[in-house]
Image: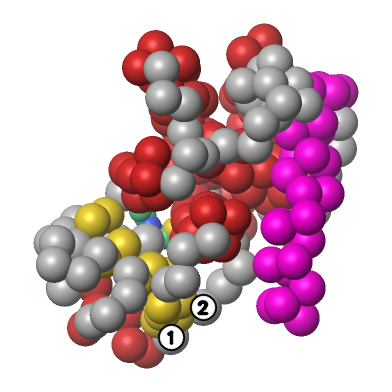
Amino acid sequence: MTKPKLTYFDAPASRGEECRLALHLAGVDFEDVRVKRPEWPAAKAATPFGSVPTYEVPGKPVLAQSNAILVYVGRQNGLHPKDDFEAARHEMMMGHVEDLRAAIGATLRMGDEEKKRVREALAETTIPAWCANAEKQIAGPFFGGSKIQVADLKLFMMVKWLASGVLDHIPATIVAGHPKLVGVHDAVRDHAAIQAWYAKQR
Ligand SMILES: N[C@@H](CCC(=O)N[C@@H](CS)C(=O)NCC(=O)O)C(=O)O
Protein backbone atom coordinates (compact mmCIF):
# COMPACT_ATOMS: atom_id res chain seq x y z
CA MET A 1 0.00 0.00 0.00
CA THR A 2 1.59 3.23 -1.18
CA LYS A 3 -1.17 5.77 -0.84
CA PRO A 4 -4.06 6.37 1.58
CA LYS A 5 -7.15 4.24 0.94
CA LEU A 6 -10.75 5.24 1.59
CA THR A 7 -13.22 2.35 1.55
CA TYR A 8 -16.99 2.77 1.20
CA PHE A 9 -19.93 1.44 -0.79
CA ASP A 10 -20.16 2.27 -4.50
CA ALA A 11 -22.55 5.18 -3.99
CA PRO A 12 -22.07 8.95 -3.97
CA ALA A 13 -23.77 9.20 -0.62
CA SER A 14 -23.59 9.68 3.09
CA ARG A 15 -20.56 9.07 5.30
CA GLY A 16 -18.32 7.72 2.57
CA GLU A 17 -18.94 10.51 0.10
CA GLU A 18 -18.25 13.21 2.67
CA CYS A 19 -14.87 11.58 3.36
CA ARG A 20 -14.14 11.36 -0.37
CA LEU A 21 -15.04 15.04 -0.71
CA ALA A 22 -12.71 15.91 2.18
CA LEU A 23 -9.81 14.00 0.62
CA HIS A 24 -10.46 15.55 -2.78
CA LEU A 25 -10.76 19.05 -1.30
CA ALA A 26 -7.52 18.48 0.60
CA GLY A 27 -5.77 17.40 -2.58
CA VAL A 28 -4.86 14.00 -1.12
CA ASP A 29 -4.00 11.38 -3.74
CA PHE A 30 -6.06 8.47 -2.38
CA GLU A 31 -7.30 5.09 -3.52
CA ASP A 32 -11.10 5.29 -3.75
CA VAL A 33 -12.13 1.70 -2.95
CA ARG A 34 -15.82 1.02 -3.67
CA VAL A 35 -17.19 -2.16 -2.14
CA LYS A 36 -19.95 -3.89 -4.13
CA ARG A 37 -22.83 -5.21 -2.02
CA PRO A 38 -22.03 -8.91 -2.65
CA GLU A 39 -18.48 -8.29 -1.39
CA TRP A 40 -19.70 -6.59 1.79
CA PRO A 41 -20.09 -9.55 4.20
CA ALA A 42 -16.44 -10.50 3.73
CA ALA A 43 -15.23 -6.89 3.76
CA LYS A 44 -17.28 -6.09 6.88
CA ALA A 45 -15.32 -8.54 8.97
CA ALA A 46 -12.09 -6.70 8.20
CA THR A 47 -13.34 -3.31 9.46
CA PRO A 48 -12.84 -2.15 13.08
CA PHE A 49 -16.58 -1.87 13.85
CA GLY A 50 -18.31 -3.75 11.04
CA SER A 51 -18.99 -0.56 9.11
CA VAL A 52 -17.64 1.80 6.47
CA PRO A 53 -16.18 4.28 5.74
CA THR A 54 -12.71 3.16 6.72
CA TYR A 55 -9.50 5.01 6.02
CA GLU A 56 -6.04 3.51 5.81
CA VAL A 57 -2.79 5.43 5.89
CA PRO A 58 0.40 3.53 5.02
CA GLY A 59 2.01 2.18 8.18
CA LYS A 60 -1.01 2.75 10.45
CA PRO A 61 -3.93 0.60 11.60
CA VAL A 62 -7.34 1.01 9.91
CA LEU A 63 -9.35 4.03 11.01
CA ALA A 64 -13.16 3.95 11.15
CA GLN A 65 -15.99 6.33 12.11
CA SER A 66 -16.66 9.05 9.56
CA ASN A 67 -16.17 11.90 12.03
CA ALA A 68 -12.78 10.60 13.17
CA ILE A 69 -11.72 10.26 9.52
CA LEU A 70 -12.96 13.75 8.66
CA VAL A 71 -11.26 15.34 11.66
CA TYR A 72 -7.99 13.52 10.90
CA VAL A 73 -8.02 14.53 7.23
CA GLY A 74 -9.11 18.03 8.19
CA ARG A 75 -6.34 18.46 10.75
CA GLN A 76 -3.69 17.16 8.39
CA ASN A 77 -4.72 19.46 5.58
CA GLY A 78 -5.89 22.72 7.12
CA LEU A 79 -9.59 21.90 6.81
CA HIS A 80 -10.38 21.78 10.54
CA PRO A 81 -9.84 24.61 13.06
CA LYS A 82 -6.49 24.77 14.82
CA ASP A 83 -8.08 26.35 17.89
CA ASP A 84 -9.16 23.52 20.22
CA PHE A 85 -12.43 25.12 21.25
CA GLU A 86 -13.46 26.04 17.70
CA ALA A 87 -12.49 22.52 16.61
CA ALA A 88 -14.77 21.09 19.31
CA ARG A 89 -17.60 23.31 18.07
CA HIS A 90 -17.16 21.88 14.57
CA GLU A 91 -17.08 18.33 16.00
CA MET A 92 -20.26 19.16 17.95
CA MET A 93 -22.00 19.97 14.67
CA MET A 94 -20.63 16.82 13.05
CA GLY A 95 -22.09 14.83 15.95
CA HIS A 96 -25.41 16.64 15.41
CA VAL A 97 -25.40 15.37 11.80
CA GLU A 98 -24.62 11.82 12.93
CA ASP A 99 -27.54 11.94 15.41
CA LEU A 100 -29.99 12.71 12.62
CA ARG A 101 -28.40 10.17 10.30
CA ALA A 102 -28.89 7.50 12.93
CA ALA A 103 -32.55 8.52 13.38
CA ILE A 104 -33.29 8.46 9.64
CA GLY A 105 -31.04 5.46 9.04
CA ALA A 106 -33.12 3.41 11.45
CA THR A 107 -36.12 3.83 9.10
CA LEU A 108 -34.37 2.57 5.97
CA ARG A 109 -35.10 -1.07 6.57
CA MET A 110 -38.57 -0.64 8.13
CA GLY A 111 -41.70 -2.03 6.54
CA ASP A 112 -43.95 0.46 4.72
CA GLU A 113 -46.39 1.18 7.55
CA GLU A 114 -43.82 1.61 10.27
CA LYS A 115 -41.60 3.66 7.96
CA LYS A 116 -44.48 6.03 7.19
CA ARG A 117 -45.35 6.47 10.86
CA VAL A 118 -41.78 7.02 12.04
CA ARG A 119 -40.78 9.29 9.14
CA GLU A 120 -43.91 11.43 9.51
CA ALA A 121 -42.99 11.92 13.16
CA LEU A 122 -39.41 12.81 12.17
CA ALA A 123 -40.74 15.31 9.61
CA GLU A 124 -43.17 16.80 12.12
CA THR A 125 -40.84 17.34 15.07
CA THR A 126 -37.31 15.87 15.01
CA ILE A 127 -36.08 17.29 11.70
CA PRO A 128 -37.50 20.83 12.13
CA ALA A 129 -35.92 20.96 15.61
CA TRP A 130 -32.66 19.57 14.21
CA CYS A 131 -32.63 22.24 11.48
CA ALA A 132 -33.51 25.09 13.86
CA ASN A 133 -30.78 24.05 16.30
CA ALA A 134 -28.19 23.67 13.53
CA GLU A 135 -29.17 27.05 12.07
CA LYS A 136 -28.32 28.82 15.35
CA GLN A 137 -24.75 27.51 15.26
CA ILE A 138 -23.85 28.49 11.68
CA ALA A 139 -21.85 31.68 11.09
CA GLY A 140 -22.32 31.63 7.32
CA PRO A 141 -21.69 31.17 4.55
CA PHE A 142 -19.82 28.13 5.91
CA PHE A 143 -20.32 26.71 9.39
CA GLY A 144 -17.41 28.61 10.93
CA GLY A 145 -17.43 31.63 8.62
CA SER A 146 -15.71 32.32 5.32
CA LYS A 147 -13.60 29.15 5.05
CA ILE A 148 -14.80 25.71 3.95
CA GLN A 149 -13.90 22.97 6.44
CA VAL A 150 -14.72 19.30 6.94
CA ALA A 151 -17.80 20.06 9.08
CA ASP A 152 -19.28 21.82 6.05
CA LEU A 153 -18.96 18.67 3.96
CA LYS A 154 -20.89 16.74 6.61
CA LEU A 155 -23.65 19.37 6.72
CA PHE A 156 -23.70 19.46 2.92
CA MET A 157 -24.28 15.72 2.61
CA MET A 158 -27.12 15.83 5.17
CA VAL A 159 -28.92 18.80 3.61
CA LYS A 160 -28.45 17.26 0.14
CA TRP A 161 -30.08 14.05 1.37
CA LEU A 162 -32.99 15.80 3.09
CA ALA A 163 -33.67 18.02 0.08
CA SER A 164 -33.28 15.28 -2.51
CA GLY A 165 -36.83 13.98 -2.23
CA VAL A 166 -35.63 10.37 -2.00
CA LEU A 167 -36.88 9.98 1.56
CA ASP A 168 -40.56 9.07 1.32
CA HIS A 169 -42.75 10.92 3.87
CA ILE A 170 -40.08 13.57 4.43
CA PRO A 171 -40.87 16.61 2.26
CA ALA A 172 -37.95 17.77 0.11
CA THR A 173 -38.76 21.32 1.28
CA ILE A 174 -38.04 20.49 4.91
CA VAL A 175 -34.79 22.49 5.04
CA ALA A 176 -36.04 25.37 2.90
CA GLY A 177 -36.98 27.67 5.79
CA HIS A 178 -33.47 27.55 7.24
CA PRO A 179 -31.37 29.96 5.16
CA LYS A 180 -28.05 29.33 6.89
CA LEU A 181 -28.30 25.55 6.45
CA VAL A 182 -29.29 26.03 2.82
CA GLY A 183 -26.43 28.54 2.59
CA VAL A 184 -23.85 25.99 3.77
CA HIS A 185 -25.22 23.50 1.25
CA ASP A 186 -25.08 26.00 -1.60
CA ALA A 187 -21.63 27.31 -0.66
CA VAL A 188 -20.21 23.76 -0.62
CA ARG A 189 -22.03 22.82 -3.84
CA ASP A 190 -20.66 25.90 -5.59
CA HIS A 191 -17.08 25.51 -4.33
CA ALA A 192 -14.73 24.99 -7.28
CA ALA A 193 -13.14 21.82 -5.87
CA ILE A 194 -16.54 20.26 -5.14
CA GLN A 195 -17.76 21.12 -8.64
CA ALA A 196 -14.60 19.53 -10.03
CA TRP A 197 -15.25 16.35 -8.01
CA TYR A 198 -18.78 15.97 -9.34
CA ALA A 199 -17.70 16.79 -12.90
CA LYS A 200 -15.16 13.95 -12.64
CA GLN A 201 -17.85 11.51 -11.43
CA ARG A 202 -20.11 12.05 -14.47
N1 LIG B 1 -20.92 5.95 13.17
C1 LIG B 1 -20.37 5.31 11.99
C2 LIG B 1 -21.52 4.62 11.28
C3 LIG B 1 -21.01 3.78 10.13
C4 LIG B 1 -22.14 3.10 9.38
O1 LIG B 1 -23.19 2.73 9.95
N2 LIG B 1 -21.91 2.89 8.08
C5 LIG B 1 -22.86 2.24 7.24
C6 LIG B 1 -22.86 2.89 5.87
S1 LIG B 1 -23.23 4.62 5.90
C7 LIG B 1 -22.51 0.77 7.10
O2 LIG B 1 -21.35 0.40 7.13
N3 LIG B 1 -23.52 -0.08 6.89
C8 LIG B 1 -23.36 -1.47 6.63
C9 LIG B 1 -23.47 -2.35 7.84
O3 LIG B 1 -23.64 -1.83 8.96
O4 LIG B 1 -23.42 -3.58 7.65
C10 LIG B 1 -19.68 6.36 11.12
O5 LIG B 1 -19.93 7.55 11.28
O6 LIG B 1 -18.84 5.97 10.30
Secondary structure type for disc 1: loop
- Tell which quarter ligand 1 is in: bottom left
Image point 47% across, 33% down: which residue?
A: 80
Work out how far the residue at label 1 is from the one at label 2, CA to CA, in angstroms: 6 Å
Name above or below for residue 112 compared with residue 72.
Answer: below
Viewer-proximal residue among 142 and 160: 142
Quadrant the C terminus occupies = bottom right
- Whether label 2 lies within 8 Å of ligand 1 gets the answer no
Q: Magenta region, mostly helix, strand or loop?
A: helix
Q: Which residue is mark 2?
A: 10
Q: Residue at x 43, y 72 (%)?
A: 30
Q: Quadrant of the N terminus?
A: bottom left
Is 40 within the magenta?
Answer: no
Q: Classify residue 174 as left or right of residue 126.
A: right
Q: Which residues are magenta?
A: 177-202
Please tell me which of labels 1 and 2 falls first in the chain. 2
Q: Which mark is residue 36?
A: 1
Find out whether residue 187 is within the magenta segment: yes
Between 101 and 22, which is closer to the camera in this rendering? 22
Which of the two residues, 43 or 123, is positioned nearer the viewer here? 43
| Residue type at the position of mark 1 | Lys
Residue 156: x percent and y percent?
67, 43
Query: Which residue is found at the position 48% from the left and 39% from the top?
Result: 78
Crowding at dot 2, Cα within 10 Å, few <14 / some 14-19 / many 20+, comes out as some
State whether residue 54 appears in this view.
no
Please state the horizontal and vertical placement of residue 50, each as a whole percent of the image: 22, 63
Q: Quadrant of residue 151?
A: top right
Q: Is mark 1 in CB contact (under 8 Å) with mark 2?
A: yes
